[in-house]
Image: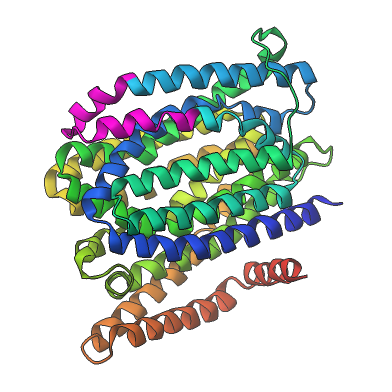
Amino acid sequence: MSITREVAHSLKWVTVSKFMAQVIRWGVTFLVIRILNPDDYGLMAMAGVVLSFFEVFASAGLGTALIQAATFSRRQVQEIFGLLLLVNLILALGMGLLAPWAADYYKDERLIPILHVLPFVLMISSLETLPSAMLTREMQFKRRSLAELTASAIAALFTLWLAWQGWGVWALIWGYMSEVTLRALLLNLVNPMLVLPLFRFNHSLPLLSFGGAQTLTTFAWFIFSSMDVFIGGRLWTADMVGIYAVAIQLSHIPLNKLTPIVKQVALPAYAKIHHQPEGELSTYYLKANGLTMLVAFPIFFGLAAVSPVLIPVLLGEKWQSAILPATLLPLILPFRMSQELMDPVLEAIGKPQEALKNWMIIISITAPSLYLGAVWHDILGLCIGWMVSMPLSYILTSRITTANIGVDARAFSKTVFPPLFIAGTMFAVVRITQAELENILPPIPLLLLEINIGALIYLSLAWLFCKREFRSILHILGKLKK
């Protein structure tokens, strides 16, 4: 099977399963948000930052090392399994000990019992790394996707039931833990890794070296993705953090759901292309980025355009304060999505240190911008910090990435600016329509009208200015349908 057909087949299963899972999760999430309060989501967001810090080191980059490696031995797999168990035990103990300090930092003692329960996630996750990595390496996404779909759907319904029973923030915590547990169990059932752990690591040093570099990249990504809540949690009340966290959750839905789909397939696909003698990696990367931007810009700009109408309809009037961040944040997310997709291509060519360099540049620009913005004007200031820093850092990191894989910078820019122009036009027209009709039409008919107008404008302009990419998307959709 050719690389193109393997990618299409993999995308089919990943996309279908993710779509089905998210239909359930989105519906359940909106119901849960209506039941719970901003305070509950604020606590979960702050606890999530602490958990995410330890999760950075949980897999030690070893899953990615196995996916990228040309060959490896059974003994190396046993050593990696032993290291995963050892590392996650240490991390779980460390997280439990850190709980009082984290509660003191955020000035909320309610975090202590939460951070004493969540460390069990780390131990459970260590059992899914090997089967997940092996399925990804062989591009066996059907089995992996069905396991993840089942775990996600059951956990979502369990979270809703707990929220309905009045469990508050604990509905989110136990719901998340149930998903991790079910996913680990099902992945080991569909792809059993019958190996005993070894705790001497001399045979796996090459994989550990790659995993260490990849872990540093993941740590940099963690700092980048968590620093807004880390800053806001210190400066704001739990209610304000909850409002911002829900705005993030809503605006990041496409990012969090689309990016993992593409990244799961991109790393093994890029690695196979790189190991082939003819080597067409730069061509594939340009095409992938062009298609990504053509899809990302209308989704995120469209979400930003309809947020003033969408949020009251979906979440209720008590979440009105989330409208402003949910309008501003999506405008920078196409750049962030493209940025995250630079990691797989750099890892595939064996240069995780270049991906790390990218994230260090982003952090050095974004962190001070977010802090100054949050101090200056709370949520609005922090959103402005995002809007200033993200495009600037994207320009710098895209130059590093394209230079490493031999892509012309001008050719790369042509994959970004046409979709940006088209999406900007669509955004302006939808907002003008909204301003003219918001006092005339009820919310739901107005929302449907805005969606249809935005889709018509974007599709028409995309056909005029991005015809080749547009046809490629139609071709891929046709393949997926078949």
Left or right, 474 with respect to 1, comes to left
The percent coordinates of residue 237 (x first, y second) are 15, 44
Q: Residue at x 54, y 78 (%)?
A: 459
Q: Residue at x 69, y 35 (%)?
A: 131
Residue range of the region highlighted in magenta in the rendering = 97-122
Q: Is residue 295 visible?
A: yes
What is the quadrant of residue 226 in the picture? top left
Is 329 left, or right, of 150 in this rendering? Answer: left
Vertical comparison of 35 with 212: above or below: below
Magenta region, mostly helix, strand or loop? helix
Task: Kindly give the residue lying farthest to the right in the view shown.
Answer: 1
Closer-to-camera residue (293/56): 56
- Residue 139 place in picture, x, y as percent: 74, 45
In front here: 41 or 411?
41
Q: Residue furthest left?
A: 376
Q: What is the tally of numbered marks visible in this picture?
A: 0
Residue 246 on image: x %, y %:
31, 55
Magenta run includes residue 111? yes
Return the x and y of residue 400 as percentages of the image width and height. Answer: 52, 37
Residue occupying the point 66% across, 27% down: 65
Identify which residue, 239 or 253, lies in the foreground.
239
Q: Please name the residue shown 26% across and 88% down the image.
A: 437
Q: Name the image quarter holding the C terminus.
A: bottom right
